[in-house]
Image: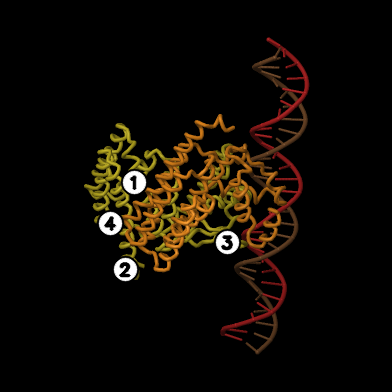
Chain colours: A orange, B yellow, C red, D brown
Amino acid sequence: MALSAVEILRSQSLPMVLEQEIERVILSGEFSPGDRINEKELADRFGISRGPIREALRSMDSSGLVEQVPNRGFFVRELSAEQACDVYDVRAALFGLAGKLLAERITDEGIEKLKALVAEMDAANAVDDFERYVKINFRFHEFIVTNAGNPTLAQQYLGLVKQLRLYRTRNLMLSDSMHASHLEHHAMAEAVIARDPAKALAAHTWHVEASKERLMANVSNSIHHRETHE
Amino acid sequence: MALSAVEILRSQSLPMVLEQEIERVILSGEFSPGDRINEKELADRFGISRGPIREALRSMDSSGLVEQVPNRGFFVRELSAEQACDVYDVRAALFGLAGKLLAERITDEGIEKLKALVAEMDAANAVDDFERYVKINFRFHEFIVTNAGNPTLAQQYLGLVKQLRLYRTRNLMLSDSMHASHLEHHAMAEAVIARDPAKALAAHTWHVEASKERLMANVSNSIHHRETHE
DNA sequence: CAACATAAAACTGTTGACAATTTACATTCT
DNA sequence: AGAATGTAAATTGTCAACAGTTTTATGTTG
């Protein structure tokens, strides 16, 4: 399966595809944070040699998904709670900027698209459809970041989101969280639709900061209850 | 010269050192943005094979200093004026966060250190010593970012600063620019010393935005006068 | 003389092999 | 039994060579 995907795109650029594939393997949870990555194992899996694997891992090292220890190899990066908070703080600043820029630059069609996304979330939120909500939520955030008209910003932001997925936690979306998040989304969209950069900056920044706090509260909670569940 | 440096640190980690060395070569201006990077040439220069070179370049690709075009190799990244603006905007957001966090967390000793740096800049500013001012200015910024207590933030910020060096421009620090910049530095330091996060956030963000505008004004100016100088 | 086709050179992408280091394991000693 | 030590296996770091592509140089044609 994975091999055929690599095989098909070989003509394009092998290590770039590899990067995505390895990323997928890591983020899918097959490799856990802290795990050592065996180069030969990956090479055999994709039917190639270790060279391209190492190049892909080097690249992922730079983007914070893996870490290299000299003479010991690559490890899936481990993100402590503290580090996750740090990433969230940076993400909040970037997302705030995205909201501000979007409010300055969004087109009329963009506004329609945004309204449609919000409407979709309204629907999912109304019936407590978590799975659907999470999906649209992702598209909503992606829309904001990619339409802010700043590729550097988009790249950095998406990189941080990837890093955050290394902070494994029983990410069960609670009903309360969803409703709170949804209210924030409305505030964000309102500010952007009103083309109010300052308000958008504040709303977008706040949304990520609030997300961080909800996650951390959730984590300490699930740690508290771990014994009863496992 | 470069070879001996590599030789000495070979025991530590070759490609990591290589990364710094190649970075130095690029940022020193020996390779210009848009230039193709010859792997063999670099390999010969450092007396090693192409493998580690490629690994280092892949890492630098991820951090935005070079770009890879399939089957054509690596090129020093070219930064358009628009892209430079984008990077500045992101940098402003990050630096604002750094200022805010620093104001929240700075220790008493940190405040003393900060005051000392400001005093040094005062001195250089008073006598229009550009070279000295630029140097301390760099240490000042570095202090802020590394003492904000958020390694992720520091890493991202420093990466952006490196990228900005790809935007070659006759970066002559004008007297007006220096004095304006200096005033902003005072406002930043004041906010941090007062441990006022909101004010620090605003002052630090503004400083980078103002720097961007000064640079851009400078650039259009120097473009205007290019013919007479070259 | 310019434009195009062709052949040679240069370069990148990838591989398999070898050296150096680390890890795992069995043996010995206290 | 448990710690220490030495050996074997596994793994990483590096290299040199080969295949495939791109670039350059050359020669030919309209």
Q: Nearer the viewer, residue B220 or B6?
A: B220
Q: Is residue C2 left or right of residue B185?
A: right
Residue carrying label 2: B225
- Label 2 resides on the chain identified as B
Image position, residue D6 (x, y; %):
73, 23
Q: Is residue A155 among the parts visible in the rendering?
A: yes
The mark lying in front, picked from 1 and 3, is: 3
User: Disc 4, disc 3: CB below 8 Å?
Assistant: no
What kind of element bears circle 3?
A: strand
- Label 4 resides on the chain identified as B
Q: Which quarter of the figure is the C terminus of chain A placed in?
A: top right
Residue carrying label 1: B135
Q: Residue at x 54, y 61 (%)?
A: B36
> In whole angstroms, how far apart are the C-alphas of marks 4 and 1?
15 Å
> In whole angstroms, how far apart are the C-alphas of marks 1 and 3?
36 Å
- Label 1 resides on the chain identified as B
> In whole angstroms, how far apart are the C-alphas of marks 2 and 4?
15 Å
Residue carrying label 4: B174
Dot 3, how many residues are within 10 Å of its Cα: few (below 14), some (14-19), or many (20+)?
few
Q: Kindly identify the amino acid type of the residue bearing the numbered disc 1.
A: Lys
Which mark identifies residue B69?
3
The mark lying in front, picked from 4 and 3, is: 3
Q: Quadrant of residue B88?
A: bottom left
Q: Nearer the viewer, residue A101 or C25?
A: A101
Image position, residue B124 (x, y; %):
26, 46
